[in-house]
Amino acid sequence: MLIEAPSGLLSSELVITPVLERALEQCARRSNVDREAVLDLILCGDLQTHSAFRYALAKAVAWYLGELGATFRAVYVHGSAITDTAGPGSDIDVIVVVDRRCAEADRVIRLVDLALTNGYRRLTGFCSLSSLLDVHVVDLEEEREGRGFGAVLHSSWAAPLCLWRGGPARSGALEPYPTHRTQVSLTPRLCRTASCSPAETRRIEPH
């Protein structure tokens, strides 16, 4: 899916098929079964498999947004994807921390959601889900002060998981006033393991 380049945003591409396939592979390794067995469990509505699949997709989204630039600061997942309660119609609860709110970042998130939702429908045949991602954007001030969904990040009972967090010196495609822009790959690869560091992140090759 091609994301056009509005002001200040480099064009980027999310190739959804390898993202879905990689998520299936991760679920298969976790459950010690093959890919087809994982897909069968998804089609049968198995809650644990749906949760694991959504968690893997949330990781893919986190590393993808992390590659785009300094406006994106962190990505968290919470809700049914980490409580093993997700079903065929469950969305993925995500909190995205941004340096500042901007239309370009909102547009990228909407297009990523559209790509994931359409891919999920094609893969599973579950067409009633209108949106796979339930994203709440929090800026740095809201995160510091614990306002809005920034309060969820500090909550002991909600316990969101941080999937990715960038350093304060990052620069990238969404940086508003770059001085030295570095070349970045715009099709991030889903991590092969849950414990990998940002430096160990691999990339998905387009099919």
Image: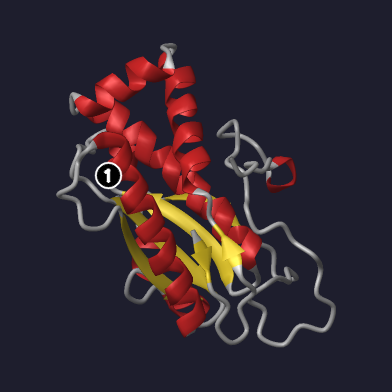
Count residues near mark 1 (Cα–Cα under 10 Å), then give few for <14, some for 14-19, many for 20+.
some
Up-down relation of residue 148 to residue 161 (above or below): below
Which residue, as the protein is rendered here, is positioned at the far left?
128
Q: Secondary structure at mark 1?
A: helix
- x, y percentage for residue 38? 35, 21
Q: Residue at left 37%, top 35%?
A: 53
Q: Name the residue tied to disc 1.
A: 121
Tell which of 187 and 32 is nearer to you.
187
Up-down relation of residue 46 to residue 63 (above or below): above
Which residue, as the protein is rendered here, is positioned at the far front?
207
Instruction: Locate residue 194 relative to residue 157 in the image: left or right.
Output: right
Q: How is the image coloured?
A: secondary structure
Can residue 101 be seen in this snapshot? no
- x, y percentage for residue 186? 65, 59
Can residue 98 be seen in this snapshot? yes
Q: Residue at left 14%, top 49%?
A: 128
Tell which of 161 and 85 is nearer to you.
85
Instruction: Locate residue 21 relative to residue 172 in the image: left or right.
Output: left
- x, y percentage for residue 141? 49, 81
Q: Residue at left 52%, top 73%?
A: 98
Residue 76, quarter of picture: bottom left
- x, y percentage for residue 137? 40, 71
Up-down relation of residue 146 to residue 185 (above or below): below
Q: Amino acid at mark 1?
A: Arg
Q: Residue at left 65%, top 41%?
A: 205
Instruction: Locate residue 109 relative to residue 121 in the image: left or right.
Output: right
Tell which of 173 and 16 is nearer to you.
16
Is the C terminus in the top left, top right, bottom left or bottom right quadrant? Answer: top right
